[in-house]
Image: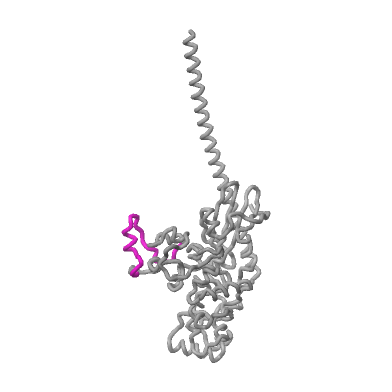
Amino acid sequence: MRRQRGGVFVFTLITLATLVAILAGVVSVRRVELRALANRTAAIRAEHLANSGIQRCLSVLQDQLITGQVPWTDADTWARFGEDGSQNFLYENGSIRLQIVDASGFVNLNTAQQSQLERLPLTVDQIEALLDWREPGFVARPNGAKDDYYNQLPNPYNARLGPMQSVDELLLVRGFAPTTLYSPPTNLQTTAAQLINERGEEAVLAELVTIGSRSANLAADGQTKLNVNTATTQALVARGIPAQTAMQIIQRRNTQGTFVRLGEVLLIPGINAQSARAIIDNLTVSAGTEIEGQVNINTASEAVLNTLPGITPDIASNIFQQQTSGFTSVGALLDIPGINLITLADIVDGLTVNTRTFVIRALGQHGPIRIAVEASIRIIDDTPRITSIRRLPPTRAVWLWGWADEATNDVEFGGIS
């Protein structure tokens, strides 16, 4: 009997231990599930906060449009909103950090000429592969690549042969890798000068470029620019072009054909600084209301300004310093030391002071979870509209945007849901 009772006791202990182990396992699994559920809930709320921040930024852009002020500069409310991500807008149990940037403050990879690409941290092979990727046709450059290369890859695909849809699409182009976009260039076989960002570090490609930037084809006074290829002498004079210069423009057009670039007009013999300013600020070679890929001299970083062909570091620095008061027109560049008509003729077609595209950067946080979002914005019918949204890894986004790791100023958001 004693042995039986002992056996029952041992069995009972084993059973209890087994039940305790099972219960502990269930509790552990349940704890993990609850933690995962809490994280998913926090991620959803953080994303909602980021999206609310985007809507708030859209209202800021709309307010700027209502004022009718042109051109827009980095001194305006839209550019200062969020203080470059240093403000922490508080809402319930979460927070949002925000920034609005001008997409025309970057180099547009879909339109940049080879001479400008050569001033980016890229090799000759990468530049030719990029040009082959975005341009139609099936014959590759000597160091480039077309379909015959991409079709032989383990996972074959075709070249875009048109405008890229995102900056990350570069990773499909021959010779490009994540390190090309997101790491400082090392041992790069190029003659391009170093491009220094606002942190005093060598800029990575991803913080210099975009694939979507448009500017309004407007004169300094807000009128639609006059097409130099169709304008009469009288129309040119009415836009401030001296009569003698207007006749020279017409004569050049009649004898040598239409102007392909506005810079060609500046090279007509006899053009002086005064007439050049009137030409730049009032004339165009485009029939469209918008132009793709121009760099905004009011909002571009000093690093981006240094990618402009013919621009020396000293000239780029002078332009950058002038952004404090802002340029009312591209023609005002003639007041910058070091810029002459020859220099300006090379780059004038790629410059603007009138942007129509923006990027909203939003970092929503709920509890420990952060969600980073970039929204591309385009002004359509005087209304800012979202054209695309993409998620970024939060840590990479904060670094890429040039933000501090933590916000320095808490602000009650109020009214955002």
Q: Is residue 19 visible?
A: yes
User: Residue at image x 56%, y 73%?
Assistant: 317
Side of 89 relative to 157 (left or right): right
Side of 405 relative to 181 (left or right): right
13 vs 310: above or below = above
Q: Quadrant of residue 170?
A: bottom left
Q: Position of residue 364 (x, y in %)?
A: 59, 52
Q: Looking at the image, which is closer to me, 129 or 185?
A: 185
Specify the principal SS of the magenta part: loop
User: Residue at image x 56%, y 50%?
Assistant: 370
Residue 163 magenta: yes
Q: Quadrant of residue 62?
A: bottom right
Q: Position of residue 143 (x, y in %)?
A: 35, 68
Q: Which residues are magenta?
A: 141-166
Q: Looking at the image, which is closer to me, 133 or 322?
A: 322
Q: Position of residue 53 (x, y in %)?
A: 61, 56
Q: Looking at the image, which is closer to me, 36 or 283?
A: 36
361 vs 119: above or below = above
- Judged from this view, the residue extending furthest toward the front is 187
Q: Is residue 223 visible?
A: no
Q: Looking at the image, which is closer to me, 184 or 182?
A: 184
290 vs 371: above or below = below
Residue 38 magenta: no
- Judged from this view, the residue extending furthest toward the bottom is 244
Q: Position of residue 273 (x, y in %)?
A: 56, 85
Coloring scheme of the render? one colour
Q: Quadrant of residue 218?
A: bottom right
Side of 158 relative to 81 (left or right): left
